[in-house]
Image (spheres, grey):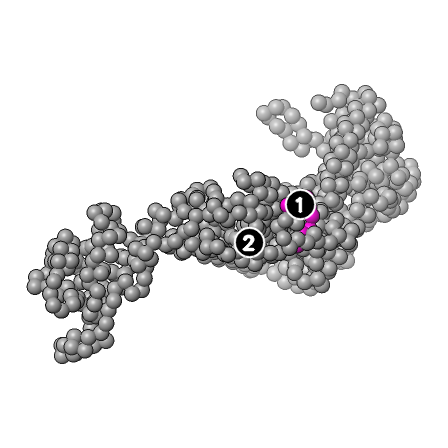
Amino acid sequence: MELLGLLKLLFILVVLGLTVSSLIGYSSRRRRSAKALSEVREQGGAIRRLSETERRALPPVYDPAKPKRPLAVESDDVFLLEGAYSRHGLESNGTSTWHDIIGGVEVFLPYDADLFLAEHNRAEVVFAGKMAVVVGLNQEFDLPGAQERDQRRNTADQQWQDGARGALQDVFVDNDEDDGGDSDRGKEKDEEEAARKRRVDIYAQRDETVAEIEARRGRGVGLLPGLLLTLAFIGLGIATARTSVLAMSLWSGAAVLLTVWALWLFWRRWRPGPPQKVNTVTGTLNLTPLLFDESNNRVTVAATLGDKLTFSLPEHWRPHVSYEDGQRLEMDLRVDDYSVVNYNRQLSLDEEIRRFPPAYWGRHFTMALVAGVALLAALMLSRAPWADLMLAWNAMSGGGYVEAREASDLLAAPPGPGTMVDLSGSGRCQVRASMGDWLYPRVHCDWIRWGGDTSALPRVEVDELTDALFADEVVKTRRDPYVEMMVKLYGRDPGQAPLVVSNPRDLIELVDSACGSRQQLACASLRDTIVEHLRVALPERPTDWRTLREEVVGYDGEKPLQAVIGRSQLGLVKRRLRAVGRERAEQAVPDLGRQIHENEKGGVLVHMIGDPGLTPASMTDIQLWRRFAELTTPGSAAPFSAKGMLVHRGEDDSGAPILVVDVTRQLDWPWRSLLLTFWILLCAVLLPVHVWLAVQQYRARRRREADLARLHGWARSS
């Protein structure tokens, strides 16, 4: 988590750094532009005055950074500005601001001045605020001519929108005057030919046909129904995790509504929607080279009808249409986007779709994909889908529990899987191997043997020696006032004075009996600890275990033999004693557990699943040994209750029936299973249906491609 937080912080710092860097660069460029503008004002002189015609033709001037505030022209003085063209800007939150630069000065390009830009520009400008307004450019652009072109462009746009019959208005008009009878007839013919190539005629305007609307809009790939269905499954998943009836009802209700909405959107009858306008036009095809690829000697060209209309063909027509410069064409173009619906009376979208309806396999693939992922999610949420189905069926059909209070009731007529059962009685927890390994036996109270023969069970008891090693009084100690007084005289806390051990002989004999001649680590550590820390009242202090044992056992003095030991050392000795006891228990427990398990016979074995509270508790070996002793004591059966669904029935090695009961599946709370059942059944219906339809529609699409290839005489691409 700390690494993730650090990465997030680093990402935020990088984004902030890039943002600040961009803002600094943007501000720096604007400052340089303002400085260059000041230099032009100071160093350059006015070359002329702005004419009245130019002033009337000048449109409103705006700063791109403040587009809502118009700028006023400062004076009619016209200055000369020369240099290369460039532009810079800033993009943020989907909006962009761009600034045009000529010779380092920010300029405002009115009308279509950008069409007359060159590598090196010579511009005539007037000043408005911190910008230079271009009024003339490269001796080709001027304000009166640009205003006229703008008016003609508006007229042409309106004519195109209205579909007015006749030649489409020219935007660029040659205003060169004739030089009388001396004009060159060849030049006139060239001009007439050029005018013919530029000419585009509108014959008629009509509405799109239904087929053309479908070609434009299509049916989509079912993203909206798929999204709604995904949200519905998410709602079902949230509902299954709720424990409140109200919350579950709200989430499941929302999921059902989303499901109905998604299916309605998917299967509702398709409506074409409002048609767009289509213009029938004729003109000459002009090809303009744009790019030459030297690697394969290919030239990329732009195809226009006349000099006015840049059209676009349907994607599946493009590989099969050959352009020829100067070719006379008749086309039906959509008014809004200049897309072709009928090409030279040879290719027609309307005819294609009416004869060969499109096949939309992607819509079904989307729904199948959503249903498949949702089905996997439902199967992962449900531990046993068939059990959820059975619980839902029992809840909806009004089924009840099969009750049993004696094991004999189940032996006579054992219920089958899927049955709701209510079992109660007295049974014994079972000893089972952990992960199949009898080195680690465990007492499982989620496994109950109900009834059965207990005569063969071994009578387990913890031996006295091992029990003594774990006893709190294994080392009998008492406080001695004399010792405490001596400690106090030395300036120490009398509460930390050593204790008197009253049974050193019993302790030595216990250790000798438990360990004997064994040299295991636990016994060796215990002997060394006693030799080091137990101060026995002997003439000489023993230095090894053998000497200590012989002198303590052979002691025949009149007074009872005593010893002293420090309080912390006493705890260490007891820990060493328990370590030896654990070693003995570790050796005995696996065999005892196996013997108990193998001698359990008869009755009914009930296994309860689903309840975390039934998980076997972790026990030490001595605790297990004592628990084994309790389980093998006559009359050790304890009350139990298993209420839920029977999910499995089998037999153990003795032939006793095994009933596996899922205690989490209850008739008084069937809602989770009902929701999962609805979820799984819905996916089980949607998935195969849409997979089959997707395959059929994909095949239909391939057949349609072949039919179109035969219709137009195309070589079908593989």
Instruction: Give the structural element (helix, strand or loop) at label 1.
Output: helix
Which residue is the extreme one toward the left?
539
Position above or below: 39 against 490: above
Q: Is residue 417 magenta?
A: yes
Of 86 and 191, nearer the camera is 86
Instruction: Tell whether 238 sits left or right of 542.
Output: right
- List x then y, in percent, for residue 308: 79, 39
Of 442 and 634, nearer the camera is 634
Residue at numbered disc 1: 412
Mark 1 vs mark 2, CA separation in Å: 18 Å
The local crowd at label 1, few if under 14, some if 14 to 19, many if 20 or more residues have their Cα within 10 Å, is: few
Give me the residue at 66% from left, 49% from top. Answer: 409
Which residue is the extreme one toward the front?
455
Give me the residue at 70% from left, 55% from top. Answer: 667
Q: Which image quarter holds the C terminus?
A: top right
- List x then y, in percent, for residue 223: 73, 45
Does residue 462 appear in the picture of this structure? yes
Residue at numbered disc 2: 427
